Amino acid sequence: MNGKDHPRPRRVVVTGMGAVTSLGADLDGIWSALLDGRSGVAEIRQFDSRPFPVRIGSEVPPELAGDDGRLLPRAARFGLEALRRAWRDAALDGGAGLDPWRSGLCIGCSSFPVMEDRVDNVRGLLDGDRLHTANYLQEIRRRPELLGQRDMAAVSALLSEGYPLRGLSMTVQAACTSATQAIGESFQAIRRGEADLMVTGGTDSLLSVACLTGFTLLGALSAWQGDPAVASRPFDRKRDGFVLGEGAGILVLEELEHARARGAEVRAEILGYGSSSDGYRFTDMHPEGLGAARCMQAALASAGLAPGEIDYINAHGTSTPLNDRIETLAIKRVLGEHAYEVPVSSNKSQLGHLICAAGGIEMILTVLTLQRRVLPPTLNLEHPDPECDLDYVPNRCRPAEPRVALSNSFGFGGQNGTLVVRRWEEA
Amino acid sequence: MNGVVVTGVGVVSALGLTAGEHFDRLLRGESGVALLDHPDAAELPSLLEARVPPIDVRRTIEQRLLRKILAPSAVFSVLAAGQALADAGIPPGDGRRRDCGLYVGSVQLDVDFNLFAPVMRESLDRQGRFDLRLFVQRGMKVLDPLFMVKALPNSGLCGITIEHQVTGPNINLANGTVSGLQAAALAAAAIRRGDADLALAGGFDSLLHIECMVEHLLAGRVAGQSDPPHRACRPFDLERQGYALGEGAAFVLLESERHAAERGARVYASVLGAAHTYLPPEHAEAGEALPNAARNALAAGGCGPDEVDAVFGDGLALEAEDLQECAAWQALGASRAVFTAATPAVGFTGAASGSLSLVHAAMALERGVIPPLLNCDRPDPRCALPLAHGPVERECRRALVWNSDWRGKRTALLVGRG
C-alpha cells in the first residue's frame, strides 16, 4: 500500500483523546485552564526537592497519580489512565467490532531507574569503590521489580493489557520527539494499510531525583527563583531553561472509513508527518535550524500542502534560550513572509516539558485548538526578544478560525518531528 | 510503488568487526561464545558470553565528543552503520547522506553501576543512610554530568547522524528484542512511500553488564558452563539450556530499487513485505502471534509459503521459545524452507538480533549459501524442523526473517532475490 501511488489514499482521523497533566485529566478542564492562563508549575511535592538548585516542576496532582497496588512506575500509571480515557472518548468500550490483528499501539516514553532505587541497591553493596555483586544478586532476589526498568518494550506491552490490540506494538524513544514520532509512524501504518486503528501518543515522568539531577547537571532547567508559575516563558527574552513536567497524552487514530463504519465521532484529520535529524551535536540544535526546517518541510510535503496553507503552529517552545530562537528561525525559513501571519504558541508555558510525552499532549491540544476555534496562549511572554519576532499569542487566548496546524517536537540529540493536522469538516 | 532493496550491510559481533569477516566465520561454523569475563560477574554462577573484540575507538570514530559520550554498544551502532554506507558505495561527504533515512532499534543503554558507587559514598550520612542534602552538595559533584545522555536509547542514532551526517527521516525504537527488525520494516515503508531513496536500518545492544546478566540469570534463560563453551547453546536439542549473553550491532542500507538501478548498485536482496503482531505469552491464543506475523509478511510480499527457501529465526535454546518457532514453521506450511539461527554462534544479541538475522538473510541470498545452526546434535523429537546443520548451498529466492521478544512482540520480514 502506498499513499502516493494509490488512487484514493487512506485517510487517517483522530477519534479519541485522553490526557493526564498537572492541570488535571479532564480534557474540558485542561482546556479551560489553559484558556484562563493557569499554570501547572509549582514546587515539586513527590520528593524533597528543597536541597536542589531547581525545586519546581509541573507535577500531576496526587489524586491522579495513585497506584493500583501494582507498584507501577508513574509513567505507566499516567499512560494507563490516559489510554482508558482516550478509549472511552473514541466510544470503543466493548470492543466496537475491532479486528485486533489490525489494531495496534505505538507509544513514546522513557525509562530511567530512579536514584532512590540505586541508593537502596548501593547501600551495603559497596566493596571498596565497586559493586559487591553477590550482595547485589541477593538484593535483586528480594526486590525483583528493580530489574527490567530499562526495557521500555514493557510500557507498550503493559498499556495494551486488556485491549484488543494485537497488531503493530512499539515503544519509541527519541527523547523529546518520542510521542510525535510515535504518532507519525502510527499515522503512516494506517495510511499504508497495515493497520486500521492505532493507539498512540506518549507518557512520561522524569520528575525523579535521578532525572532532576541529570537535567540540572546538563544546565537545561530553568533556575527561576520567583513564582514557579512564571518560570516557563517560551520566546520571552528572560527565558532561562525548561520546566520539567510529567503526564501522558494518548490518541486513537483510525482509518476514516473504519471510523465511519462504526459511527465514531471524528475530531480531526492527520494530513502529514515529517522527521529529520540535525546531525550536529547531542545537546545543541543546529545553529541555523536546518534540521527543524527540513522536518517541517517534509511534513508539508507528506500532507501535500504549501507553506501558505498553514494557519497555526503548536511550537516545541521549550523556554530554553536556544530552542526558541532556533525554532523561530526555522519557522521563518519554511514559511517565509507568511511566518509573520501565523500564530505560534507553546503549551509548555503552562504544562512544562513532558519530554517523551510532550508531542502527545501537544497534539491533543492542537486538535482542540482546531475544534474549538480558540488559540491557547503562550504564557509569561512579557519581555519581547528581538530574535523571537513572531506572533506567539502572548498571555491571552484568542478566538480564530485555524483550519490547518503544525505540531513541532525537537529532541535532545537532534531528532525532529512535525505533524500536520486539519480541522474536521464533513465533506 | 517503489521496490526496496538491500545494497549495503554492516555488522559488529563476537565473530568480527566487519560483515564479511562475521559472515565467513558464521559459514565456517565458528562461534564467538566463551566463558564470561567481567569484573562484576566474578561472584555470579559461571556464565557465557559472546563479546565483541576490542575496538580502537580513536581510530574508528572521528568526532572526539562522540567518543566521550557514546556507550560501547552505541559505538557498535556507529561502526556498523558506517560499514553499511561504505558497502553500498555512499562514501563520507556524499550529498546523498543528507536525505538518507535512519531507523534504529535499541534499548536503554548500560549506565555502569559502578558510576554511582562514589556518588553514593559521598551521599551517606554517619549512620550510612542516604542524605539528599549530602547528595546535592557532594554526591552530584562526582557524578558524570553526561550520565543521562550516555544512557539515552537514541544515543546510537544521534551518534550515527553526527558521525555519518545521515539526517533524513528517522525513528528510534526502544521496543525490546524486535526493535532492530521493526526498524528495518519502518525504513522499507518510508522508502516505498517515497520519503527517502536511501535509509539505514538496524539495531544494537549489549547484554554484557551486571543488570542484564542478573536479569537473564534469574529468568533461567542463560546457558551455564559447558565444555567447550561454544557448544553450550543448543537450540532444538534435547539438552538445550539457554543462550550465551551477546552484544553487537547490525545495519542494512535500504534503497529504492529505481535509485539502486540508476547508480548501478550491487543488490543483495529485495525487501518484499513485513508484519508485526503482539500477544503476551500467557494469552490463550499467544501461539497465533508468530504464524500470523509470518503469514502477513508473506501476503504483503505476494509470496506463498511453499516458495520460502529459508527461515532465519531466533533459536534461543529455550524450551518454550524453540517449540513456538517449530509450531510457527508448521502452521505456516513452509515445506521447502531450511531453518537457521545464529544465536549459538553470536549469543543472544537482544535488540540487534533481528537486524542481524536480516543481514544474514541478505548475504545468504546474494551468496547462495545459508549459514548453519550450530550444536543441535540430538534434536528434540517435538522439533521437526529442517535445520541447516551445516552451510546449505542453495539458490534462495525467498527468505523469511522472524524475531520474537519475550514479552510477546513478533516481527516477520520477507526478503527475495530474482
Image: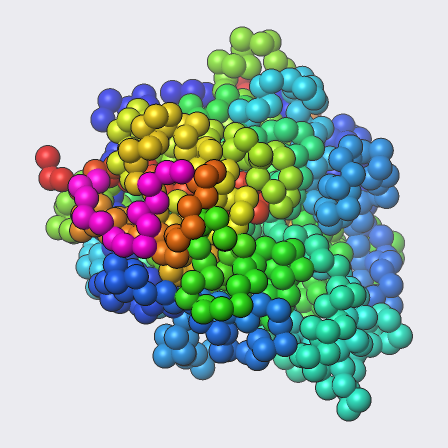
Nearest to the observer: residue A416 or residue B316: A416
Res. A156 in view: no
x 53%, y 47%: residue: A321
The image quadrant of residue A300 is top left
Nearest to the observer: residue A345 or residue B385: A345
Where is residue B281? Give x, y as percent. 48, 62
Rendered view: A345 above or below B366: below
Q: Is residue B121 left or right of residue A289?
A: right
The quadrant in which the N terminus of chain A is found is: top left
Where is residue A240? Give x, y as percent. 54, 54
Is residue B187 highlighted in magenta?
A: no
Q: Is residue A321 left or right of residue A388?
A: right
x 45%, y 58%: residue: A232
Is residue A400 highlighted in magenta?
A: yes
Where is residue A204? Give x, y as percent. 47, 61
Nearest to the observer: residue A10 or residue A343: A343
Q: How is the image coloured?
A: rainbow
x 35%, y 45%: residue: A392
The image quadrant of residue A137 is bottom right
Direction left: furthest residue: A427
Q: Is residue A47 left or right of residue B341?
A: left
Q: Is residue B257 left or right of residue B52?
A: left
Rendered view: A360 above or below A330: below
The quadrant in which the C terminus of chain A is found is: top left
Where is residue A150? Give x, y as percent. 61, 61
The image quadrant of residue B225 is bottom right
How many discs appear?
A: 0
x 40%, y 38%: residue: A389
**Residues drawn in magenta:** A389-402
Magenta: main secondary structure equals loop
Res. A333 in view: yes
